[in-house]
Image (cartoon, rainbow, N blue to C red):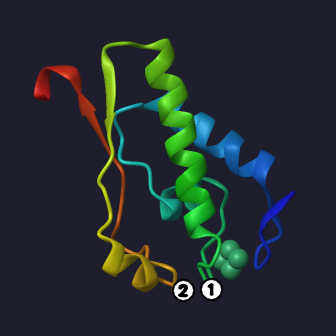
Amino acid sequence: MIVCHCNVITKAVIAEAIEELVADDPYRLITPGLVYRQLGKRGKCCGCFPQVVALIVDRLEQFQTSNPGYTVQRTSIAPGLQADLARPGAFEGIALAPVRQRDL
Ligand code: FES
């Protein structure tokens, strides 16, 4: 399944890049931009970024399940901001923040 139509990148390729980044450093802040850099690509319209964020969250949650000391903190998005976040480029600067258990 193609997730990024601008760069013709499949879900499997994106998931593999996320896997490499998590394996390298699970406490690194993983953003769609970082995933695309790992692939040697760049976001163009960035319409795929919400799907890439969902893949990042899924992978980090899987990692948390297999590593109980690792915690991913989700930030809730206010309903009024959800429409704004649906526009292209809205995810620039927004990232998921892995948190070490001792930081909580
Ligand atoms: S669909 Fe991925 S950058 Fe446009």
User: What residue sits 36% from the left and 51% below the top?
Assistant: 96
User: What residue sits 52% from the left and 61% below the top?
Assistant: 32
**Residue 66, x across and y down, in percent:** 50, 13
Q: Amino acid at mark 2?
A: Pro
Task: Tell me: residue 26, above or below residue 3.
Answer: above
The reply to whether the residue tagged 1 has its Cβ within 8 angstroms of ligand 1 is yes
**Residue 100, x across and y down, in percent:** 23, 27
Q: Classify residue 51 as left or right of residue 24.
A: right
Mark 1 is surrounded, within 10 Å at the Cα level, by few (under 14), some (14 to 19) or many (20 or more) other residues, namely some
- Residue 103 falls in which quadrant of the image? top left
Residue at the limit of the structure toward the left, as seen here: 103
**Residue 67, x across and y down, in percent:** 43, 13
Task: Tell me: residue 89, above or below residue 34.
Answer: below
Question: In the rendered view of the protein, which quadrant contains the C terminus?
Answer: top left
| Disc 2 to disc 1: CB gap under 8 Å | yes
The reply to whether the residue tagged 2 has its Cβ within 8 angstroms of ligand 1 is yes
Please tell me which of labels 2 and 1 falls first in the chain: 1
- Report helix, strand or loop for mark 2: loop
**For the residues marked 2 and 1, what is the alpha-carbon distance in whole angstroms?**
6 Å
Mark 2 is surrounded, within 10 Å at the Cα level, by few (under 14), some (14 to 19) or many (20 or more) other residues, namely some
Task: Tell me: residue 32, above or below residue 30.
Answer: below
Would you name the residue on which mark 2 appears? 88
Would you name the residue on which mark 1 appears? 45
